Amino acid sequence: MLEVKELTKLFPVGRRRITAVNDVSFRVEENEIFGIVGESGCGKSTLGRLILRLIEPSGGQVFFKGQDISALRRRAMRPLRRSMQMVFQNPFASFNPKIRILSALTEVCRYYGMSADETRDRIGRLFADIGLSEDLLYRWPRELSGGQLQRLAIARALLSDPSLIVADEPLSALDVSVQAQLLNLLKALRGNRSMAMVFISHDMTVVEYLCDRVGVMYLGRIMELLPGSDLSENALHPYTRSLRASSPRLDRFKDGEKSDTAALLKGETPDPSHVLKGCPFAPRCPEASKHCREEIPEIREAAPGHLVRCHLV
Ligand SMILES: Nc1ncnc2c1ncn2[C@@H]1O[C@H](COP(=O)(O)OP(=O)(O)O)[C@@H](O)[C@H]1O
Ligand SMILES: [Mg+2]
């Protein structure tokens, strides 16, 4: 469904340039939920925007269903927009406060050229899928909770039957109990449509619970790429293990989880405009050697389907 190849994005900051996304490659298959996780500022949102071509890459390519969309002109992108949708973090900002929910959703359907019958049918079916009462259609956004609005934002993204959804921290503004409900909703929705999802989060526990595979980012680079179910027991990179050990436990969502013994993550994320020659994580890594500080490791396959960028593995 999606292939990202050597994707890079530089931003000019004063006289310097920061590399917000640095040589990122991965594939997402149909029906797969691919997680992108890392601390604030590591380049997750930039990567999400690059995938949907809301911003232009400095280098690399994005293939959607085999087509290189990085080379398409704006006008040629337009018909693809319907199949690629985004869900944002703040549900309160994603609905116009002056428009009732029904009108907001109908407007989207009209934009995609659906008839009135088709629109009614589509909205009705989605409300059933998403577990919302159709009474909400006649409400104003301010009358709804964050959880209800985020369900509606997900419903709105699904109206056009997209093949790919990029969700950028869609749960981060919600209470933990509401997060758990929405996580289960996203899992259920994936089950009955042929859709891929890129799920961006700073929360290790959430991606472990939801995602089939996960890319762990640090300073614009993928440091480890592994099955979500391997995050707590089989992560190899010292960064992934520290991030996991610093996170709340998975029993926030379900029971029965051992805790990791890796060192807790210390120190701040470094300034991305500062160019390092070695491994980007070396300054915070409890295990870093001289080699780590001098040469950046390549990303390598440590086990089938498990990539890691670390000299020590
Ligand atoms: N439009 C921009 N101009 C300059 N720098 C930017 C811009 N967007 C993001 N950045 C920088 O790129 C880096 C990655 O940002 P972002 O992708 O938002 O990270 P995340 O979503 O992981 O928090 C940060 O250092 C951020 O300050
Ligand atoms: Mg972000």
Image (cartoon, helix red, strand yellow):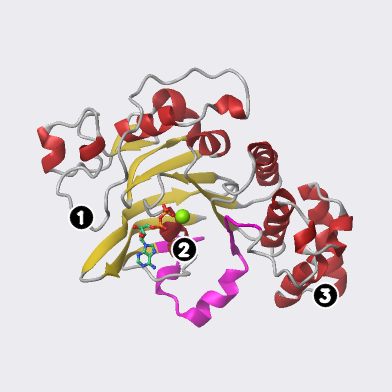
Give how far across and how far down residue 76 sits, in percent.
Answer: 51, 79
Ligand 1 within 8 Å of the CB at mark 2: yes
Task: State which quarter of the image contains the C terminus.
Answer: top left
What residue would you read off at disc 3?
A: 115
What residue would you read off at disc 1?
A: 274
- Residue 84 magenta-highlighted: yes
- As measured in the structure, the alpha-carbon distance from the residue carrying label 3 to the one carrying label 2 is 30 Å
Which comes before the other along the chain, label 1 or label 3?
3
Amino acid type at circle 3 is: Ser
Region rendered in magenta: 62-91
Give how far across and how far down residue 233 sits, in percent.
Answer: 43, 23
Residue 187, by quadrant, is: top right
- Residue 190 magenta-highlighted: no
Q: Secondary structure at mark 1?
A: loop
Label 3 or label 2, whichever lies nearer to me, is 2
Task: Give the residue at x 16% y 44%.
Answer: 278
Q: Between 312 and 168, which is closer to the camera in this rendering?
A: 168
What residue would you read off at disc 2?
A: 49
Residue 109 versus residue 224 in the image, above or below? below
Ligand 1 within 8 Å of the CB at mark 1: no
